[in-house]
Image: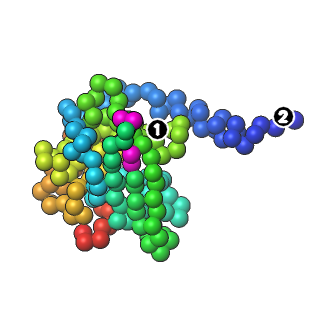
Amino acid sequence: MCRLPRLALLLLGILPGLGGCAGMPENPPATVASVDLNRYAGTWYEIARFPNSFEDGQGIECTEVTATYAPRPDGRLGVLNRCRNAAAGGAPRDAEGSAYVMEGSHGAKLRVSFFWPFYGDYWVLGLDPDYRWAVVGDRNREYLWVLSRRPVLAAGDYAEAVGIARAEGFEIGRLQITPQRGG
């Protein structure tokens, strides 16, 4: 009987699924024309999200979620995601990663990794002209976030952000509000 190392078995289980991730859907969502990453850098508060395994998985219920982006000397962006895990009594939970800009996207499409060699889409679908709020999703419309520079987003701004997601084909009924301190 042949025995494969555990990592090889894990990769054999994951790799077939990655083929579907690599393909572009017929009609991917549109992004903003460009993003000035120096203006985009800093801390963003998660106002709402589609449920996902890394924020809503077994034993995980993220609240007070923030994402902080910082330019790095190598041209990438440092990414620090933080939350309070309500399922663990509010214990802090951090994830550090990095992102790079997809060629030709003028900063509107990034690839983010928290665990090399795996990357995910980070497409800026909507962005307030003053960089007060943003709508971020992926090419397959599986992930969606509404972000704000403050823990609270005005109702009109939230409606505009959700309208952008709806117009790009996202199932906005899946959005859940993220509890924020001071929100």
Question: What is the secondary structure assignment of the residue under circle 2?
Answer: loop
Q: Nearer the viewer, residue 36 or 139?
A: 36
Q: Secondary structure at mark 1?
A: strand
Residue 16's place in the image compared with 71, above or below, is: above
- Give the residue at x 30% y 67%: 180
Frontmost residue, 132 versus 21: 132
- Please state the horizontal and vertical placement of residue 23, each as a whole percent of the image: 44, 27
Give me the residue at 53% from left, 36% from top: 117
Q: Which residue is mark 1?
A: 119
- Looking at the rendered image, the quarter that the N terminus falls into is top right
* Callout 2 crowding tier (Cα within 10 Å): few <14, some 14–19, many ≥20: few
Q: Amino acid at mark 1?
A: Tyr
Q: Amino acid at mark 2?
A: Cys
Locate residue 132, reporting x and y percent.
Answer: 17, 52
Residue 81 placement (x, y as % from top left): 40, 55
Nearest to the observer: residue 6 or residue 100: 100
Q: Which residue is mark 2?
A: 2
Q: Is residue 127 left or right of residue 3?
A: left
Figure quadrant of the C terminus: bottom left
Residue at 18% over, 55% down:
158
Region of the chain picked out in magenta, as a range: 74-79
The quarter of the picture where residue 164 lies is top left
How many dots with numbers? 2
Q: Residues within 10 Å of mark 1 (few under 14, many from 20)?
A: some
Name the quadrant containing residue 142. Answer: top left
Furthest residue to the bottom?
89
User: x, y percentage for residue 108?
Assistant: 27, 35
Q: Is residue 28 magenta?
A: no
